[in-house]
Amino acid sequence: MRFVTSRNPPTTGKPRSPTEALRHPGDRAELRANFRRADLDHDGRISLAEFRSLMETLDSGMSPEEIAVGFAELDTDHDATIGFDEFVAWWARD
Ligand SMILES: [Ca+2]
């Protein structure tokens, strides 16, 4: 993983994978708050652009490619948006 260190300083336990970048102990209210924060135009879905903004806000250290992969992972019904249910499913996944 040496190639990521210049962009992502060695912080202990810094999550790297799209499915782990946002995962941390949090309750449902926090989850909803994060979803709302990500849903910039308040249409109840997260677009790729909004997802990218969220990842930048959370300082995920993900590249555009990783963000695109992460987005695709979340978008389980392939409608090019992430609904709250998809967001929750992803967050709760183990
Ligand atoms: Ca979707």
Image (cartoon, rainbow, N blue to C red):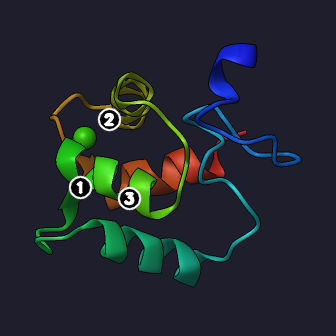
Residue furthest to the front in view is: 6
Q: The disc labelled 1 sits on which kind of residue?
A: Glu
Considering only order in the chain, which callout, 2 or 1, is on the residue closer to the N terminus? 1
Looking at the rendered structure, the kind of residue marked 2 is: Asp
Numbered tag placed on residue 54 in the rendering: 3
Disc 2: which residue: 75
Q: Of the residues shown, which amino acid type is indicated by label 3?
A: Leu
Q: Is residue 60 left or right of residue 44?
A: right
Q: Quadrant of ligand 1?
A: top left
Residue 93, which numbered label?
Answer: none
Displayed quadrant of residue 85: bottom left
How far apart are the two marked residues, 3 and 1, measured between alpha carbons?
Answer: 6 Å
Label 2 C-beta lies within 8 Å of the nearest ligand 1 atom: yes
Instruction: Rate crowding at label 2 as few (under 14), some (14 to 19) or many (20 or more) other CA atoms within 10 Å.
Output: many
- The location of residue 40, given as percent across then percent down, is 19, 70
**Which element type, helix, strand or loop, lies under badge 2?**
loop
User: Which quadrant is the C terminus positioned in?
Assistant: top right
Q: Are marks 3 and 1 in contact (CB under 8 Å)?
A: yes
Dot 1 lies on which element?
Answer: helix
Horizontal and vertical percent for residue 36? 32, 76
* Numbered label attached to residue 50: 1
